[in-house]
Amino acid sequence: QYVIMDGDTLEPLKIVSTRGMTVDTQEYHPEPRVAAIVASHKHPEFIVNVKETGKILLVNYEDIDNLSVTTIPAARFLHDGGWDSTHRYFLTAANKSNKIAVVDSQNRSLAALIDATEIPHPGRGANFRHPKYGPVWATSALGNDHITLIATDPAGNPEHAWKVVEILKGQGGGSLFVKTHPRSSNLWVDTPLNPDEKISQSIAVYDVNNLDKGFEVLPIAEWAGLGEGPKRVVQPEYNQAGDEVWFSVWSGKEQESAVVVVDDKTRKLKKVI
């Protein structure tokens, strides 16, 4: 189910069930979970991923007593996703289906359903301008070492739009998040679920203007200077200025964890918190 709440008080105003039929085999699912929810930039709508049924709901909240919902069939096991650079298209992973669904939030329709490599897991994904293909959106994966780049400019680059234009080789599988920033030329890729400690405790970083160069590995967990523990490095996040990248270093609940701050331009350690 999903809940529509008052934005000021967080009072629940309406609870809506997501039970229904799956998009592929048309079997009834009694308890499909809600995954990503994002707000449309084009209409007064929430975009709601229903995981197990594979449906994307466009929930118009103008009149919640007479709720209007557009249902878009996509692929099962919808999870997380993010906007393209124009905030018109929402790209979201159907991870166990190995698909990326593209929703046109302006036209309220499915723009594309793209094949991806094993268990794509983009977080919000990462947008940057590719030297050859123009605007692209990137996702990493849980099941392999691929970073998949999808072209996202149907107006300026229609021959490549919604196609996989390049696959970068990363450190390994087990990635959860990729990140970049409009003021940066770096693309950061974590691998916290990789079974190799050297990989799960470090980060790969690419120069988006020179992708053929490959990645540099930064020993984030080593920089943290912690004691025993898995020290998994996860979820790079930029500050607002785009000149710092913050990493979580996760250990067990009885062990010390940290936040590591890296200078985006020099890729050097700036602070351990």
Image (cartoon, helix red, strand yellow):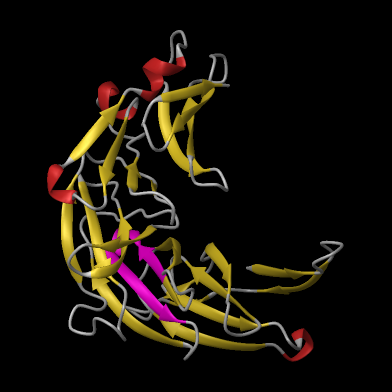
Residue 159 placement: quadrant? bottom left
| Residue shown at 28% from the left, 33% from the top | 194
| Residue shown at 32% from the left, 37% from the top | 191
Vertical relation: 97 (above or below) 236: below
Residue 221 placement: quadrant? top left
Judge whether residue 88 can be spotted in this image. yes
Q: Looking at the picture, how far across and down is residue 41, in whole percent?
A: 58, 77
Q: Looking at the picture, how far across and down is residue 88, in whole percent?
A: 47, 79
Left-right relation of 52 to 24: right
Q: Looking at the picture, how far across and down is residue 241, in whole percent?
A: 55, 47
Left-right relation of 261 to 95: right
Vertical relation: 176 (above or below) 73: above
Residue 92 belongs to the span the image colors magenta: yes
In depth, the one of 176 and 245 nearer the eye is: 245
Judge whether residue 195 can be spotted in this image. no
In depth, the one of 261 and 198 nearer the eye is: 261
Vertical relation: 141 (above or below) 202: below
Residue 9 belongs to the span the image colors magenta: no
Q: Which residues are magenta?
A: 91-104
In depth, the one of 264 and 18 nearer the eye is: 264
Q: Looking at the picture, how far across and down is residue 259, in whole percent?
A: 53, 27
The main secondary structure of the magenta stretch is: strand
